[in-house]
Image (spheres, grey):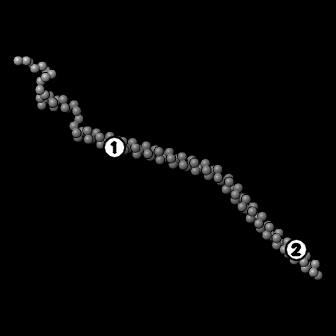
């Protein structure tokens, strides 16, 4: 009869258990996976928080730049509006004076 070499021996329960103890169990894999998912979620939440802060900062900077550019224009428009109101009031006074003068001239011409 042939002798069986060590490579051809049947796997015993003892050998199988010794070999499998180096590999994780289903529960260990599940726990590791859960921890990995939780770490991933936390990292994503942190990254989104940073992105949100960057966006808010960029929006604030943009808003400040726009307001800084518009502010002198609005002051100029307000000044021009005041000038127009003054000119309109003066024009009304002059128109009233002209009307009065025309009435006086007409009255003098008829007398």
Quadrant of image for the N terminus: top left
Which residue corresponds to mark 1? 38
Q: Quadrant of residue 33?
A: top left
Q: Please tell me whether mark 2 or mark 1 is closer to you in this view.
A: 2
The picture places residue 105, in percent across and down from the top left corner, at 91, 76
Residue 11, above or below 59:
above
> Most extreme residue toward the bottom, as rendered?
111
Provide residue 44's location: percent of width, then percent of height.
40, 43
x and y percentages locating residue 98 in the rendered image? 85, 71
Q: Give me the C-alpha separation between circle 2 and circle 1.
A: 91 Å
Point 93% across, 78% down: residue: 109
- At 85% from the left and 75% from the top, the residue drawn is 100
Residue located 94% across and 81% down the image: 111
Mark 2 or 1, nearer chain start: 1
Picture coordinates of residue 8, whole percent (x, y): 13, 22
Q: Name the residue under label 2.
A: 101
Q: How many marks?
A: 2
What crowding class fits label 2: few (fewer than 14 Cα within 10 Å), some (14-19), or many (20 or more)?
few
Question: Relative to residue 34, is residue 58 drawn left or right?
Answer: right
Q: Is mark 1 on a helix, strand or loop?
A: helix
Q: Say whether residue 95 is left or right of residue 69.
A: right
Q: Left of 75 or right of it: where is 45?
A: left
- In the image, is residue 96 above or below residue 41? below
Question: Residue 31 lies in what quarter of the image?
Answer: top left
**In the image: residue 28, left or right of residue 97:** left
Q: Tell me the SS state at disc 2.
A: helix
Please tell me which residue is depicted at 80% across the width and 67% down the height of the picture: 91
Residue farthest left in this picture: 1
| Label of residue 53 in the image | none
């Amino acid at each position: 009869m042939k002798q069986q070499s060590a490579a051809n021996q049947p796997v015993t329960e003892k050998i199988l258990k010794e070999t499998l103890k180096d590999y994780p169990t289903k529960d260990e894999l599940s726990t590791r996976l859960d921890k990995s998912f939780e770490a991933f979620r936390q990292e994503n939440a942190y990254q989104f928080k940073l992105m949100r802060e960057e966006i808010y900062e960029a929006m604030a900077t943009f808003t400040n730049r726009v307001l800084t550019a518009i502010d002198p224009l609005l002051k100029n428009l307000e000044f021009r509006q005041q000038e127009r109101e003054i000119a309109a009031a003066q024009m009304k006074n002059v128109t009233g004076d002209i009307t009065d003068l025309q009435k006086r001239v007409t009255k003098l011409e008829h007398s």
